[in-house]
Amino acid sequence: MHQTTASTCCYCGVGCGVLIEHDGTRIHNVKGDPDHPANFGKLCSKGSTLHLTGDIAARGLYPELRLGKGLARARIDWDNALDHVADRFAEAIREHGPDSVAFYISGQLLTEDYYAFNKLARALVGTNNIDSNSRLCMSSAVVGYKRSLGADAPPCSYEDIELSDCLLIVGSNMAYAHPVLFRRLEEAKARRPEMRVIVVDPRRTDTCDLADLHLAIQPGSDVALFHGLMHILLWEGWVDRTFIDAHTEGFEALKALVRDYNPAMVSELCAIPVEALQQCARLIGNAPSFLSLWCMGLNQSTAGSAKNSALINLHLATGQIGRPGAGPFSLTGQPNAMGGRETGSLSNLLPGHREAGNPEHRKEVAAYWGVEQLPETPGLHAIDLFEKVRAGKIKALWIACTNPAQSVPDQRGVHEALATCPFVVVQEAFFTTETCRYADLLLPAASWGEKEGSVTNSERRVSRVRSAVPAPGEARADWSITCDFARRLEIRLHPEQPSRFDYQRPDQLFDEYKALTRGRDLDLTGLNYALIERIGPQQWPFPDGSVTGTTRLYANRVFPTANGRARFIAEHYQAPRERREARYPLTLNTGRLRDQWHGMSRTGTAAQLFGHVEEALLGLHPDDMRRRRLLEGQLVRLRSRRGSLILPVTRDDTLQPGQAFLPMHWGDRFLKGLGCNVLTLPDHDPLSKQPELKHAAIEVEQV
Ligand code: SF4
């Protein structure tokens, strides 16, 4: 019988509503949900082909275990699989302490899954060694929001994109990475051609087609650009002194710092004309409303936190925040990186936007979970985690719904770490990923269309994810695997205690989690599954008694800092960590294509998603091709200080001379050698710990 189930797309942070058409056993089609406020029925090429991507041959159907590194894995039943892993974790915890185990999870998990993992790691195991791939994605934005505004809360809504008079898009190829939002912007600009769009990107991407002004800055020079803009805004008197005096602090220090960033100096540093810099400042300074959108170009950097704060400075100086069409607005990479941040799924966080390093916060959460205390020792962030695994410090590692063997930088080191870790569990829907190869125990997880829960998109909107068909084979929902394991570990570690993981349904996890948000900036206490069913997806905060969500934060000009004021952050520009030099004269940038997603475990199963780009190609400027006597399609070797990779080269005149671009999607299942992250460096931002995935020095030579 034909049925339709409303759910949410599982790819990017736009969080589009989808209608799944199915017969209860098979998904036949996917359409945009006209009632969902993120997309009003629109879908991009990835969302509209979701029903073509569930290739059963790629799916994990049964748990598989191997009892030694050199042995083949064999099918095992769930009870024995989970008992085995509980034994191994309990043994490691007893012999080496709770910090000898670690969890590496994912921005693609649902909020309920995240919460279960957090409670497991912190309350049961007693470790903060739980980090997620959001570390590679949004952690610099988290620091930016918290430092400047007091809480990790994107203040804007998608409707602000349509209402704004001036949009600054920085380090984001929105046309590819957030296509439905970009379509909303295109339509808004068609309706209001006077709207001004500025794109800052070293590449002339498809997003630039909509730009009134494109600033092709030198890679990594964003902080210098923002300070240069601030310098001009001050010089011209285009700042809002009333707002600055009444609602901010730290402006004088910033003013003193940006004095040095005069137009001539910034023009040289960023390699853009002075006139373009001045034009950009004029557009921002005179716009009735000014909105900025950014993504990985700012976040994935050794100066990611400084870049985020320097951009937010522009909003605070002009008072462009907390009103329609205005504010700093990060575009989330993954479908539920927001939910991860909310539930505490970075090693330094706790549920409800709390800090693991804050004794009061630990006390609050410990009391709620009914444990004596939560661990104090700082947890490992993604990059350190795999280094510690490689150093033999982690005896048991649990990886869920992510593929670090492809996505974490300095990939060779990660492969070494996974190969030598005494016990690796991988919980995954697709058993084809590079990481699965290293699993001692593989646990098949339910995937999109097969599981229930919730996600939060870039505009703080909580949507439901619903199940339409049963998971194949014996695959199970992530939260259910985690809680089943936790119950078995409880018996081994604390046999005298009643279980804290006795959940039968995901809404029980949601309801328990939301109570931890009471009184916090993201208060969700008024939301539940039944209410979302009735009134649709809602934006937080949504405290008890609310009738509707919150469209825009800080409309009252009060910020969640100790004194209610937002803070200017004054930090100098720092060049990217790895400089170009004679042996490595090109700058490598990595990023997304329009029709692929992450490591292609899902999109790689749909033939039509290869229609846009068929294979991994290194893009080089025609001058750099000519200088190296390279022909279109010729195989080249890319070398960085960390590794090399062979693949075909293509002319790309959207790049500037001296720059190279490589899509992030293809791993060693497709390439001669590991993926693009064999070339990238593990150096990371000192505060956010987010690695520099957008800037590595390389050389390219004929094979
Ligand atoms: Fe899915 Fe993002 Fe495309 Fe929307 S824009 S359909 S959320 S991939």
Image (cartoon, rainbow, N blue to C red):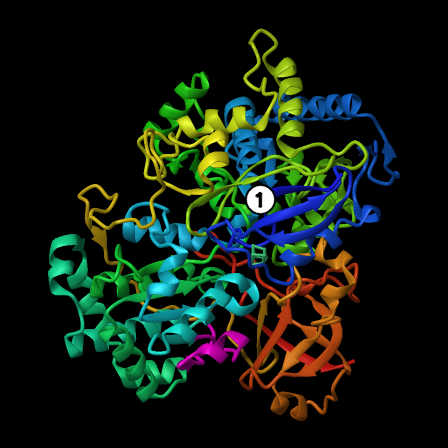
**Which residue occupies the foreground of this view, 484 or 12?**
12
* 215 drawn magenta: yes
Ligand 1 is in which quadrant of the figure?
A: bottom right
Camera-nearest residue between 405 and 320: 320
Q: Residues within 10 Å of mark 1 (few under 14, many from 20)?
A: many
The x, y position of residue 503, in whole percent, is 58, 20
Residue 594 higher or lower than 477, as above or below: below
Quadrant where the N terminus is found in the figure: top right
**Quarter of the view holding residue 366:** top left
- Is residue 287 shown left or right of residue 635? left
Residue type at mark 1 is Leu
Q: Is residue 439 left or right of residue 511?
A: right
Q: Residue at x 61, y 27 (%)?
A: 96
User: Residue at label 1?
Assistant: 385
- Can you tell me whether the CB of the residue at mark 1 lies under 8 Å from the nearest atom of ligand 1? no
Q: Is residue 687 visible?
A: no
Residue 142 placed where, x, y %? 40, 50
Whole-percent x, y for residue 330 in the image = 42, 57
| 474 lies left or right of 640 | right
Q: Can you name the residue that lies furthest to the front here?
A: 1
Which region shows up in magenta? Answer: 200-219
Name the residue located 34 percent from the left edge and 73 percent from the top edge: 224
Reply yes or no: does residue 4 show up in magenta. Answer: no
Lateral position of residue 406 relative to residue 550, left or right: right
Q: Which residue is at the front of the view, 104 or 617?
A: 617
Q: Position of residue 689 (x, y in %)?
A: 47, 52
Any part of residue 405 in sight: yes
| Residue at image point 57% right, 67% down | 176
Q: What kind of element bears circle 1? A: helix
User: Is 601 or 702 nearer to us in this picture?
Assistant: 601
